[in-house]
Image (tube, grey):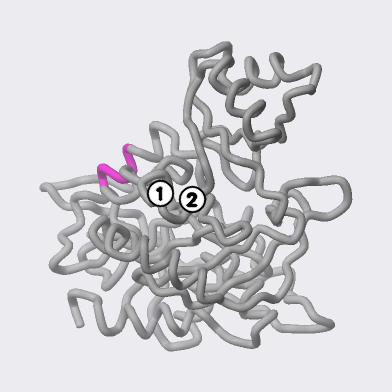
Amino acid sequence: MKLTFIIDPIERLDPTHDTSVALMETAQLAGHQVFMTQATDLSVRDSQAWAKLLPVTLAPVTLGEGRWLAVEDWFSLGEALWQPLEAMDAVFMRTDPPVTVPYLYATYLLDYVNPTKTLVINRPSGIRAANEKMYALQFTSVIPETIVTSDREIIRAFVERRGAAVLKPLGGKAGEGILFLEPGDRNFNSLVEISTQRGQVPVMVQQFLPEAKAGDKRVILLNGEPIGAVNRVPTGSEFRGNMAVGGAAVKVAVTDRDREIAAALAPTLQRDGLIFVGIDVIGGYLTEVNVTSPTGMREIDRLDGVRLGDRVLDWLAQNSPAQ
């Protein structure tokens, strides 16, 4: 197969952690042709999506002393060439959030990939529909009590009633801007004012789950089915478990409750073309649905002795329009 990955500049990626690199590496090891591009190198010509594609060759990571190891020069690039994306079997849209205006424009350009010829993962319209905080709200049976508002008094009433809550910017990523709120905090008003830009921007406020101290589980879903999980445990005085802010990756199993949550999501994810998704689960509750560039694959592979990329490629071989 020919596979293209739309990623951030490759030199900024961490080959020992980044899921995009893990997927490209697995594809290369399986003998597929792997190309990369950036969202800024997309265009539409004659109502077709094109991209400036660079063939990429990776030096695979190795496992040593319980962690992934990468050589210094871990990738090399071939000559860039403009090609129609319909020449690919699949295109992985893996640019990191935040979902800015240029990011949205990139998804509009990807709408011009013919779905009868090439699969885009995840579907551009699905990415646009699935704000990673708001999307979870439709699954009321599996989420904690949650509000979305820019009104300080509504937020205060919620926090006073629940005793504590977590505030999340709707456009945040990797734990950025997440705050722990308590009614007696003397900085309460200031925290809310800063987060809502003085009442101009809505935020999510979610029931605080004490189980968060035991970890924030990332479950990888492939077409709605759980294929692996990793627990991200807060360290030190940090209440967030995100690996980007120092959370420790710990081995964990996919539970019956995780499968129950996935089953509740699966029909909607499949409807929206959200094939490769990471859900966050705390204390048996769904807290977020990550659709832009969900991570965790490297950690699951290391801890469980698997290669989840093989599962993704097997699914793709059976479901790519060209197959």
Q: Is residue 132 left or right of residue 130?
A: right
Considering the numbered disc 2 on the image, is that residue within a helix, a strand or a loop? loop
Neighbourhood count class around disc 2 (C-alpha, 10 Å): few under 14, some 14–19, many 20 upward: many
**Residue 81 makes an appearance in the image:** no
Q: Are marks 2 and 1 in contact (CB under 8 Å)?
A: yes
Q: Amino acid at mark 1?
A: Thr
- Where does label 2 land, which residue? 143
In the picture, measured across the screen, residue 273 lies left or right of residue 287, that is left
Quadrant where the N terminus sits is: bottom left
Depth check, front residue: 141 or 86: 141
Residues under labels 2 and 1: Cα distance? 6 Å
- Tell me which residue sits at (20%, 83%) in the image: 323
Asked if residue 19 is among those painted magenta in the image, a careful observer would answer no
Residue at screen point 71% across, 60% down = 215
Boundaries of the magenta span? 105-109
Q: Which residue is mark 1?
A: 140
Q: Residue at x 51, y 76 (%)?
A: 256
Percent coordinates x, y for residue 246 in the rendering: 78, 54
Q: Residue at x 70, y 56 (%)?
A: 211
Determine the secondary structure under disc 1: loop
Q: Is residue 40 above or below residue 36?
A: above
- Name the amino acid, label 2: Ile
- Magenta-drawn stretch, dominant element (helix, strand or loop): helix
Above or below 309: residue 134: above
Q: Is the residue 196 above or below the residue 235 in the image?
A: above
Residue 227 in view (yes/no): yes
